[in-house]
Amino acid sequence: MEKYVSVIIPTFNRAEYLGEAIDSVLAQTYPFFELIVVDDGSTDRTAEVVRCRQAESLQQITYLWQENRGPAAARNKGIKAASFDLLAFLDSDDRFDKRKFAIQMATMLEQPACLVSHTDETWYRRGELLNQKQRHRKSGGDILARCLELCAVGMSTVLARRGFFELIGLFDEDFPCCEDYDLWLRASSQMVFHYIDQPLTIKHGGRPDQLSIIHRVGMDAWRIKAIVKLLDCGRLNPDQHCRALAELARKCRIYGSGCLKHGRQDEGHFYLGLPGRYGYEEGGETG
């Protein structure tokens, strides 16, 4: 049954965009999939949008509802409910290119040892096409250094085997945001990523309901927490540890200085001193 894909769409109050996301899955040229929509406690027309697609489509569409617990819990619920070994994810305001499964599945089936692949993506902001900066370019192989710097893998670009989550664990439900950053840190420290250099996901940014907007002020603190988790896990080799510690120091310096600037003295001093607890000395040396 490995030719089948379980597609998981977590959503919260995005009925306005959800229909297009679902339609982009149903339009795939690769027909072997199930679709699972996990409603994270929406109060809008989300359920109605899903019911309409269920009535109109011959494809299997499962609708799951839960109390509002955030995207990590919603994705985990979808993973646990999935029938198949291969798992794809789509944020409810993104869309798939109709060829995504056909191209990505060919790679996964040709490489049975590959646990995860991701693709390039096309970005729009307020309807205008964005040219990605060089630092946002995707890549494959050992991508830990890039994952430490920023969220280097787009959630809606991924196709992963269930063994991926069996190895690194599910999404951390304590994270209200940056749960994907945390996941990619854990994964890229243990495996290589296969990259397909084609833009097979369409992303839309700049909407006020996006977590990157809602949690904009505190996102760096959650990224720092993710790096601390990585340093505490005890699995990093010396080179990985040095890279993680250097990035922790960089992020803490920026975030801690920002806290001091805005009058949050205790918080600022905590973050500025945090790298030293892991043996970091200014200049990048570790004790």
Image (spheres, rainbow, N blue to C red):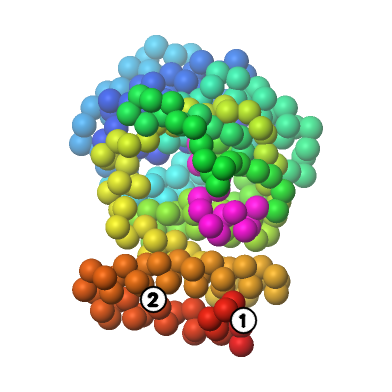
Of marks 1 and 2, the one in the foreground: 1
Residue located at (68% from left, 29% from top)? 105
Q: What stretch is highlighted in magenta?
A: 143-156
Q: Is 268 left or right of 236, judged from the image as shown?
A: left
**Nearest the eye: 81 or 122:** 122
Q: What element carries label 1?
A: strand
Label 1 belongs to which residue? 285
Residue located at (57% from left, 27% from top)? 200
Residue 217 location, x and y as percent? 30, 57
Instruction: Answer whether residue 257 is visible to the viewer in this image.
Output: yes
Q: In this view, does 200 lie above or below 154?
A: above
Residue 54 location, x and y as percent? 39, 19
Q: Is 33 left or right of 72, judged from the image as shown?
A: right
The verdict on residue 163 being magenta is: no
* Amino acid type shown at disc 1: Glu
Residue 166 location, x and y as percent? 62, 54
Question: How far apart are the alpha carbons under marks 1 and 2?
Answer: 18 Å
- Number of residues whose C-alpha sits closer than 10 Å to that of mark 1, classed few (under 14), some (14–19) or many (20 or more): few
Residue 211 location, x and y as percent? 33, 46
Name which of mark 1 and mark 2 comes first in the sequence: 2
Q: Is residue 232 above or below residue 23?
A: below
* Residue 271 disc label: 2
- Number of residues whose C-alpha sits closer than 10 Å to that of mark 2, classed few (under 14), some (14–19) or many (20 or more): many
* Residue 145 disc label: none
